[in-house]
Image (cartoon, coloured by chain):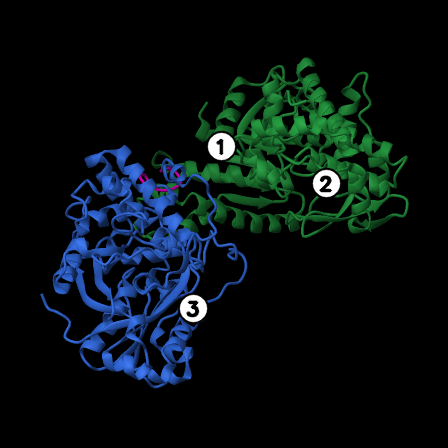
Chain colours: A green, B blue
Amino acid sequence: MDYTEKLQNVSVVGAAGKMGSGILLLTAMEMADLSLKPENKKRHFCINAMDVSGEALSGLMKYLKAQVLRAAERKIVALRDAYSDRKDLIENSDIINQYVDDVLFLVRPTTYLEPTYDSSVVFEAIKEDPELKVKVFKQINENSKKKPWFCTNTSSIPINELDKNAGLDGRILGVHFYNPPAVQRLVEIIKTDNTDPELVEFANTFSKNLRKVVVPSADFAGFIGNGHFMRDALHGIKEAEKLAEKYSFTEAVYMINKVSQDYLIRPMGIFQLIDYVGIDVCQYIMSVMNPHLKDEDLHSSLLDKMIELGVYGGQNFDGSQKDGFLKYEKGRPVAIFDINKKAYQDISTLKDKCDKELGELPASAKPWKAVIGDKNKDEFFKTYFNELKSLNSKGAQLALDYVKRSREIGLKLVSDKIAFSEKDVNTVLLTGFFHAYGPINDYI
Amino acid sequence: MTKLRRKTYMVAGYNTVSLGTGRKEFHPKKPRPGLEHYIKEAGQETLKMIGGAENVDETVIGNFMAAGFNKQANLAAFAPYIDDGLRYKPAVRVEGACSSGAMALATGIKSIQAETADVVLAIGVEVQNSVKAMYGADILAAAGWAQERKEGHAYFFPGKFSDRAKAYAEKFGEEKARKATAKWYQNAIENARLCPTAQEYHNTTKDLFEVGMTKPNPKAFVDSLNVFDCSKVSDGASAIAILSEEGLKRCGIDKNDCVEILSMGMAEEDITKPPADLTKLSTTTAAVEKALDSADINKERIGTVECHDCFTIAGIMAVEAIGFAGHGSGTDFVLEGNTSRTGSVPFNTTGGLIGWGHPTGATGVHQAVTIWEQLTGKAGDAQIQIKPEKPYGLTINMGGDDKSLVSIVYKKAV
């Protein structure tokens, strides 16, 4: 396999979406870096940015320019070397601007699928819809002369199923980036029963060059990431529903969100995370996974109801958060959706009461931000969870139940052979979800 | 050696905060005071202490690269912006890269010597947070020879001193060099914590030596320096008044509040030539020798030094350039604690460039202000003890890679 040759003509389908734009950015920079190597000076590179929305493609180009500029600034030391033969580029600013141009000039935005027929590798990041994905794969595959490789970013659909239904003969691999791809370090790689080994080798080299952490997952709906997240979310939802028998709905959501963030020392509470991913996306992923599960119903009627009411969450193109279970101002939750009144209730009106109900946080508690970079995190969590166990408060009890459930989910992914090791489960949560500790631990 | 012909004094020193990363009030995305603000704040505070602008004959503003950082030249015309009383009076802006501040002092001293002024307001200023560090590196690279820029490192000056650090480590041992620079860093931050205007005043790191020992990361930065070895990007200004005896009388200033300038030594080296020996600051030695000769003192009588530690290795080399330690022994001298605030000759007692900050064009003036504070007992929490047998203060301000040097000897006036 000639890695460079494979990357000379690439397409990203669904390029203007949240995931597609990140994959496009990283791939275009990798291609530009290759093109700058002396041995590649005569090679021609191009990347098709295909999306059905022309308007979104305009936004994509603005996003790309800003992101490439930031990346170029960060890697100026390496870029000075890469452009050492260009006598006309003297200052850092000259080199940075040239690199931005060199990356952007590789990108060909298009609303048509035809340009992708020339590509050796196609990254797919369209809607999480098996039929639509199969249709797109088929069309490209049947029209292409190159027998292209397909890297799908699906987070939940079994790859074998896509392979079989689109007739790709093993030229497909799950290459699942996390949101946002430019920031999150995790890539889950999912082989089918007959994925071309060269494609796997390519994806591993590619991910490594992008400085990603690769975790292999078995080809089972939801893989490791959503396999954990969807169940973890469902646990939070169920706990909130239980609390809502005694408290108001908004109070219940507030308490579980607080427990899953402050008590669990996670980057965001579970309802905020559902909003971040999108309530509709979560509902859809569950519906894709559910038919494959035995003895388990991965479904939430609460999510259905939110969607019926037109509350979706998710993000705007600029990365700002749309309102969902929570309402956001400058990215911070300020109110909670009252499903009965169909209106948001300010957090300030219920915070004091709920905090009192939950009880004091353990004295050693720290915010996630303060712990994530700590070299002695392990020691900290030992002390912290010991203290949590000694508390006899509602908050501590909810938190302990949550930690136990999260661990149970992780262990089941291993015993079901979806994850190849406990370490892989922890790596996914640490690098794909930015957790400060893996779910499979001995803290409690 | 030529001696100063006329008694010359300094008084009324003032430093703005050295603003940049590390200061609690600094936020890279929020608006900050501009060049005008800093010139005005420092200038006005010094004017207040000398009875107002009407007492001033001339203003000198030292600045390196406002043309690049702030798209601003013709800085002399900011003198009347400080105070209406400076309108239609002479003012001049001087530039000598990072020695611009001391060049401003030298220019003021020369006016006093020439008897064309009795009271000079000297200001140094630089506002560098206007651009990100990698673009600031382009602007600062102008302190070197422009023909060398293309071959130079992305971070041009850190690259230059990384080469020096590498040569020094190769010649005298890497481990000791690393420890000595870590110790230099520790001293700098500990001193800065005692000075409210210092950029590292809010630094709360527990084990400073360990931080100083951080291994360099050539992929993200330079080969032989870590980021803690480098002075930070700073916005700030310093001001001080330079006066003759007549000037003191005019302003009604008590000599007890002043330092006397005993000498200054200036030296230039060819900007197009690489250093003959990367492990030595030869031009620094030349300037310091001139200053000490002219003041007629030897180095043993120096009680405190403000040296140009733009990088920790430059601090070690300055110790050797002055002659406190032999070539290659500056490391021991520092590790034994001689340069710390309770050592035999405390260096950079308000943090120096590493700890207080390095608003490039302001640094030379800031050094003079620190020496003035220390010798007249005005250094507050940062005050060190000045022993009677070591009454002299020394400043060394360096422009470029040991190219433009100004060294000044001070003593409390009597």
Marks 3 and 2, how far apart in space? 44 Å
Residue B256 is tagged as none
Q: Nearer the viewer, mark 3 or mark 1?
A: 3
Disc 1, disc 2: CB below 8 Å? no
Relative image position of residue B211 (x, y in whole percent): 41, 39
Secondary structure at badge 3 equals: helix
Mark 1 Cα within 10 Å, few/some/many (few <14, many 20+)?
A: few
Report how far apart the C-alphas of labels 1 and 2 lie in the structure.
Answer: 28 Å
Q: Main secondary structure of the magenta part?
A: loop
Instruction: Note whether residue B276 is visible.
Output: yes
Circle 2 residue: A272
Residue B73, relative to residue B27: is it above or below? below
Q: Is residue B144 left or right of residue A202?
A: left
The residue beneath circle 3 is B38
Q: Position of residue B46 (x, y in %)?
A: 38, 73
Counting residues from the start of the chain, the first of labels 1 and 2 encountered is 1
B224 is within the stretch colored magenta: yes
Q: Taking the image as drawn, is residue A42 in sight?
A: no
Chain at numbered mark 2: A
Q: Are marks 3 and 2 on the same chain?
A: no
B345 or A102: nearer the viewer:
B345
> Same chain for marks 3 and 1?
no
Nearer mark to the viewer, of 1 and 2:
2
Host chain of mark 1: A
Quarter of the figure with the N terminus of chain B:
bottom left
Residue type at mark 1? Arg
Q: Residue at x 46, y 43 (%)?
A: B205
Q: Which residue is mark 1?
A: A211
Residue at coordinates 53% horizontally, 28% vertically from top-left?
A213
Amino acid at the residue labelled 3: Tyr
Is A45 magenta? The answer is no
Check the image and report above or below for B15 versus B216. Answer: below
